[in-house]
Image (cartoon, rainbow, N blue to C red):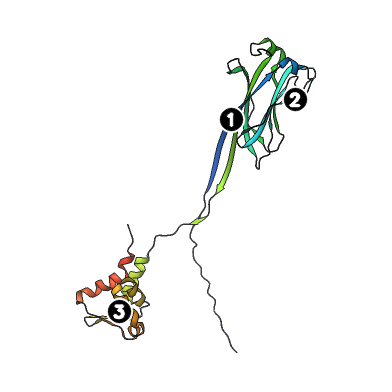
Amino acid sequence: MFSSSKSVVLAGRDAPAHTVSTIIAGAVSGSHVLTVRGYSTTVGLGVDKILQSSNFSVGGHAWNTMYCPHGHDPDGDWISVGLNLRHAPATNFKIRCTFSLLDNVGETVPRYTTECRMATCSNKGEVLAFPTFIKRAELEESAYLKDDCFSVKCDITVTKIRTEDKAQFVMVPPSDMHEQFDRILQTGELSDVTLEVSGETFAAHWCLLTARSSVFMEQFLPMKENVLQEGVHVAAPHRARRRVLEFSLAAGCRRQT
């Protein structure tokens, strides 16, 4: 038995592909005020004794602030503060924070305001520390320590940056269907039925005629085989023959502007 096969290699220019991505940057800010009551009692707790605030949320992450009355140096005289990440995020993010001593009406004191540089956080337990926030002697001699009480405010800004990839899309050229229908009307290409108008014959297309005209659909569909074999006689003035074909084949596909 002899068999044969054919293969076709199609070569041409692919439609240009276009991709889109978006960089989305957002920042969320919040603050927390830690008040220490009974300051003189905390001073006697010793070096590296860390007292923590309650947890709070900023930027979708849990934090707390830390107060160390003797700092981290046995011979030092500084009060230390810090910010502690309590919840590990899924991805890295940027943070900036500022610690400020508050006066007796709750306003920040510029002299005792310290801002950290932009930092990257990623793991639970990371700390942004301010080991030399204020000297104990300066706090004790100031008006900001009142009734053995003082307050520190922590301002936080969390910045998140992500990139979103959009689905690839292909630019589709404008439709030229109207030109293709005009061509087969002029050339008779792929025609399968013949129309006779005032003694003159025209090559036409059965499926297009029936799709475009309910009149043709009603007349042609019940006798499809006869139409294809014998053709159709259209009783129309000679001057109308071209208009009949143009309407049936091409008019409905004109480009919209």
Residue 190 sits above or below residue 26 on the image? below
Q: Give the image location of residue 32, x and y in percent.
A: 62, 26
Residue placed furthest toward the bottom: 1
Nearer-the-camera pick, 94 or 182: 94
Q: CA distance from mark 3 to mark 1?
A: 77 Å
Check the image and report above or below for 1 versus 249.
below
The residue that label 1 is drawn on is 30
Residue under the point 57% across and 31% down:
29
Q: Quadrant of the N terminus?
A: bottom right
Tell me which corner region of the image, top left, top right, bottom left or bottom right, holds residue 92.
Answer: top right
Distance from the alpha carbon under mark 1 to that under mark 2: 23 Å
The residue pinned by badge 3 equals 219
Work out whether 10 lies above or below 48: below
Three-letter code for the amino acid on which mark 1 is drawn: Gly
Neighbor class of circle 1 (other Cα within 10 Å; few <14, some 14-19, many 20+) is: some
Q: Give the labeled residue for mark 2.
A: 50
- How many numbered discs sit on the rendered protein? 3
> Residue 226: x, y in percent?
33, 85
What kind of residue is marked 2? Ile
